[in-house]
Image: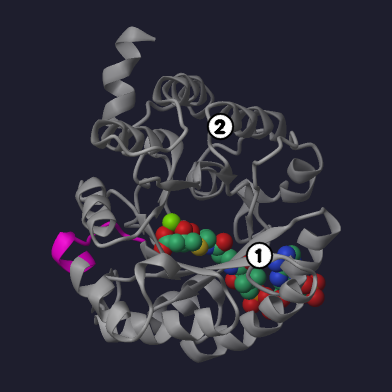
């Protein structure tokens, strides 16, 4: 078995830091991630720069990124303006990001739940015409800070609509990191019963309640083979204050190494990168594996 790690540190991680990281530090971060063996690295977002100032340098970042054979740099794109900007800078893969709840759609996208699809439809259509690969996220898969628990059927309805636009994969986001393995099982079963199997799904767990690794193992046992993670466990969403860091890539790789599952990623090299980045961010990595390995590096 092989697991694909979809690295989100440069995007989900850095979008939520108080410090705005200089573009050359971002480039070095991404270069180090590729050197450690990561092949899918979500580099940045072409969102409104006022909404996420931490990633306002998206164009400049992409122009100077190291082009490594076999390494892909998807970016987040919410709307046609974002797509235009991404195309100008040679992007070949994008990700749209929908919400399973009304409140988060309004807060994160300034759109109602229904009108988010009107925003995404021309983005996906035009991206496919340009030969881009398009991923979709669905956020607030288990609960939302304003609306409380979210029913699996609601997530499946939204996820199905996003996939039907023409996306190759749907990443299930536990934006506020509140879910447990029971939630994961129920949601994956709900997708399966609507004809969406684990081969079309990825999982994206934030680790607020320390459940991310248990939730990931549950998803792997149910056949999911793409897992989102963030080096050093940095991350969160500025439009959902209760969101903390993503599942740390080091914690994921440590577990997968132990299970004998191939990833092609070197955990010690990632740890060295997280220790280096922590110096730039001015705070230690929350990853348990980084903390444990720090003594040997
Ligand atoms: P809006 O204000 O409704 O935009 O924002 P608009 O369409 O009304 O346009 C207003 C002005 O903004 C116009 O300029 C546009 O050109 C400009 P004007 O004509 O007034 O001069 N504009 C843009 N400029 C640059 N780039 C753009 C862009 N779009 C419009 N892309 C919008 C709507 C979606 C843009 C805004 O709400 C936004 O940027 N939201 C992004 C929020 C965000 O990035 N959140 C974090 C990522 S999601 C996440 O972290 C969750 C995830 O990790 C999964 C999980 O954990 O669950 C993915
Ligand atoms: Mg996220």
Q: Which residue is mark 2?
A: 33
Q: Residues within 10 Å of mark 1 (few under 14, many from 20)?
A: some
Check the image and report above or below for 127 versus 17.
Answer: below
Residue stretch rendered in magenta on the structure: 175-184
Residue 260, horizontal then vertical, whole percent: 29, 34
Q: Which residue is mark 1?
A: 133
Q: Quadrant of ligand 1?
A: bottom right
Among the 4 quarters of the image, the one containing residue 154: bottom left
Q: Residue at x 50, y 47 (%)?
A: 8
As drawn, the residue found furthest toward the left would be 182
Question: Can you say which quadrant of the picture contains the C terminus?
Answer: top left
Q: Residue at x 57, y 74 (%)?
A: 167
Q: Residue at x 56, y 32 (%)?
A: 33
Among the 4 quarters of the image, the one containing residue 139: bottom left
- In this view, the residue in front, 56 or 100, is 100
As drawn, the residue found furthest toward the front would be 1
Mark in the foreground, 1 or 2: 1
């Amino acid at each position: 078995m092989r697991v694909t790690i979809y690295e989100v540190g440069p995007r989900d991680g850095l979008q939520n830091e108080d410090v705005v990281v200089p573009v050359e530090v971002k480039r070095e971060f991404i270069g180090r991630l590729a050197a450690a063996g990561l092949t899918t690295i979500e580099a940045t977002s072409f969102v409104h720069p006022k909404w996420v100032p931490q990633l306002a340098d998206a164009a400049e970042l992409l122009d100077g990124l190291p082009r490594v054979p076999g390494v892909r740099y998807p970016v987040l794109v919410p709307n046609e303006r974002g797509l235009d900007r991404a195309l100008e800078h040679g992007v070949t893969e994008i990700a749209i990001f929908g919400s399973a709840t009304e409140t988060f759609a309004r807060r994160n996208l300034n759109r109602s739940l229904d009108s988010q699809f009107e925003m995404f439809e021309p983005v996906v259509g035009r991206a496919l015409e340009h030969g881009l690969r398009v991923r979709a996220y669905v956020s607030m898969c288990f609960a939302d800070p304003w609306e409380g628990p979210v029913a699996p059927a609601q997530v499946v309805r939204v996820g199905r609509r996003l996939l039907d636009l023409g996306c190759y994969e749907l990443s299930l986001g536990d934006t506020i990191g509140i879910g447990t393995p029971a939630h994961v099982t129920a949601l994956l079963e709900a997708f399966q019963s609507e004809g969406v199997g684990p081969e079309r799904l990825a999982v994206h767990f934030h680790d607020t309640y320390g459940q991310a690794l248990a939730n990931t193992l549950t998803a792997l046992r149910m056949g999911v083979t793409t897992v989102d993670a963030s080096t050093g466990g940095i991350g969160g969403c500025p439009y959902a204050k209760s969101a903390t860091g993503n599942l740390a890539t080091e914690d994921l790789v440590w577990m997968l190494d132990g299970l004998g599952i191939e990833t092609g990623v070197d955990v010690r090299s990632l740890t060295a990168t997280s220790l280096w980045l922590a110096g730039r961010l001015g705070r230690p990595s929350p990853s348990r594996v980084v903390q444990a390995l720090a003594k040997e590096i």
